Amino acid sequence: MSAEIESALDQIRPALQADGGNVEFVEVTDDGIVKVKLTGACGHCPMSAQTLKFGIERTLKQKVPSVTAVVAV
């Protein structure tokens, strides 16, 4: 599942990088919770919670059905 998550994040990264940010995959738990680290401009952006839930989480759930949630660490 980690490879599928990385592949999905690779599709998201160009949009984040265009705004000076990025996302790093940290781990996935046994119950499908993906832990990521927002870096660059995304790390301290006031809109990062929306980016995480409505961008990253939505995309990962579509591409990798076993993903149940995405959290920032």
Image (cartoon, helix red, strand yellow):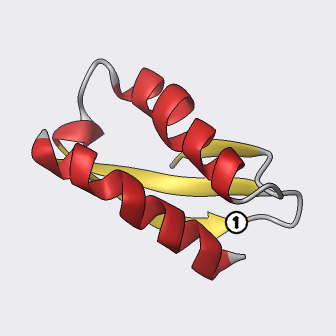
Local SS, label 1 = strand
Numbered marks: total: 1
Say above or below: 69 vs 1. Answer: above
Q: Amino acid at mark 1?
A: Val
Is residue 24 among what the camera can see?
A: no
| Residue 23 position in % (x across, y down) | 36, 55
| Residue 72 position in % (x across, y down) | 51, 44
Q: Which residue is mark 1?
A: 28
Q: Quadrant of residue 47?
A: top left
| Residue 53 position in % (x across, y down) | 55, 29
Is residue 73 among what the camera can see?
A: yes
* x 59%, y 55%: residue: 35
Left/right placement of residue 33 relative to residue 59 reads right
Say above or below: 4 vs 35. Answer: below
* x 83%, y 58%: residue: 66
| Residue 56 position in % (x across, y down) | 50, 42
Left/right placement of residue 71 relative to residue 67 reads left
Say above or below: 44 vs 11. Answer: above
* x 28%, y 18%: residue: 46
Q: Quadrant of residue 30?
A: bottom right
The quarter in which the N terminus is drawn is bottom right
Q: How many residues crowd mark 1 within 10 Å: few (<14), some (14–19), many (20+)?
A: some
Q: Furthest-bottom residue in view?
A: 3
* x 13%, y 39%: residue: 19
Q: Furthest-right residue in view?
A: 31
